[in-house]
Image (cartoon, rainbow, N blue to C red):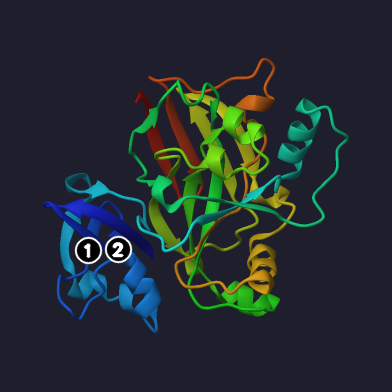
């Protein structure tokens, strides 16, 4: 099942995508008003979503709506992992002149809820704020239930689905401060989508290919098999530190090929276009524009 959020005829709506057509949830009290409420309040969110092709409004062509982030209004910051692909950890250590050392524990930071953007939204770049905007293709998971001190099986069952994220990063700001939050939270610096693909459609989240193209040129090509901490382990470990709630978003890290680690370094400029894809999950495509 592929769940979407969108703008349709001047209203914020949600529903499911079947091929190139959408079935939108009715605007009634009997139905959740958005994806967040669908996740938080449904005792069986997947079962409810599966009824939309019969009970929803549609079919509506995807081309007739403006897709938003699947969860455009998360309750709390997007959680992210740093250095979670072995090859990316190696390139990061190399460019900083450090010996290669894999993280023993997840490197966790967050991005502000306010930087979440749609799968095709423009990303404004103010060159007076940053001169080093970088790309990071990632797969993010969405938690579907309350989890606290979960074991592996419970953590796996608690993953509702997956989506694509570009963890856009202002490297000059990121490296200037001891924490990553400021450099990761610029306006629209977390485009995601185009849909939330439910976990039942993903055979193995540790065998997914990821790609990032800038202006049509391949910059990143990786596979989730290279992750230091697997998706299920990430959820389990985080749940032992803090309770996880339905609708929490966890971006699981990026493969190698980011701009700051290239020789010479490469960064985004107004007029560029960044496309991030996770095969089987989806593709987002965002223009960089002058702020």
Residue contact between numbered discs 2 and 1, judged by CB atoms under 8 Å:
yes
Determine which quarter of the picture holds residue 119: top left
As drawn, the label of residue 105 is none
Name above or below for residue 266 compared with residue 36: above
Quadrant of image for the N terminus = bottom left
Q: Which residue is mark 1?
A: 23
Q: Position of residue 189 (x, y in %)?
A: 45, 39
Q: Position of residue 273 (x, y in %)?
A: 41, 26
14 vs 187, left or right, is left
Q: Which is nearer the N-term, disc 2 or disc 1? A: 2
Q: Residue furthest bottom?
A: 43
Dot 2: element: strand
Nearest to the observer: residue 131 or residue 283: 131
Determine which quarter of the picture holds residue 152: bottom right
Q: Which residue is mark 2?
A: 16
Name above or below for residue 254 compared with residue 110: above
Determine which quarter of the picture holds residue 191: top left
Q: CA distance from mark 2 to mark 1?
A: 5 Å
Q: Position of residue 2 (x, y in %)?
A: 37, 61
Name above or below for residue 80 compared with residue 272: below
Dot 1: element: strand
Q: Residue furthest front?
A: 177
| Circle 2 Cα neighbour tier, 10 Å, few/some/many (<14 / 14–19 / ≥20) | many
Q: Residue furthest right?
A: 99
Q: Position of residue 202 (x, y in %)?
A: 53, 62
31 vs 287, left or right, is left
């Amino acid at each position: 099942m592929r769940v979407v959020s969108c703008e349709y005829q001047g209203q914020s709506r949600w529903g499911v995508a079947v091929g190139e057509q959408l079935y939108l949830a009715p605007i009634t009290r009997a139905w959740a008003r958005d994806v967040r409420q669908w996740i938080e309040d449904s005792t069986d969110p997947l079962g409810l979503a599966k009824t939309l092709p019969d009970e929803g409004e549609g079919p509506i062509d995807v081309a007739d709506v403006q897709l938003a982030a699947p969860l455009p209004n998360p309750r709390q910051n997007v959680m992210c992992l740093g250095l979670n692909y072995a090859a990316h950890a190696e390139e990061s250590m190399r460019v900083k002149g450090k010996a290669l050392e894999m993280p023993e524990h997840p490197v966790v930071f967050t991005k502000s809820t306010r930087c979440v953007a749609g799968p095709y939204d423009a990303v404004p770049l103010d060159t007076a704020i940053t001169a080093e905007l970088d790309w990071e293709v990632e797969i993010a998971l969405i938690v579907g239930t309350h989890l606290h001190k979960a074991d592996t099986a419970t953590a796996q069952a608690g993953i509702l689905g997956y989506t694509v994220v570009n963890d856009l990063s202002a490297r000059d700001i990121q490296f200037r401060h001891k924490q990553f939050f400021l450099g990761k939270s610029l306006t629209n610096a977390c485009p995601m989508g185009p849909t939330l693909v439910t976990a039942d459609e993903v055979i193995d989240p540790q065998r997914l290919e990821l790609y990032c193209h800038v202006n049509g040129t391949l910059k990143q090509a990786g596979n989730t098999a290279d992750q230091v901490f697997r998706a299920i382990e990430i959820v389990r470990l985080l749940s032992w530190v803090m309770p996880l709630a339905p609708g929490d978003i966890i971006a699981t890290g990026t493969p190698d090929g980011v701009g700051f680690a290239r020789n010479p370094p490469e960064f985004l400029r107004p007029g560029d276009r960044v496309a991030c894809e996770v095969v089987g999950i989806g593709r987002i495509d965002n223009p960089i524009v002058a702020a």
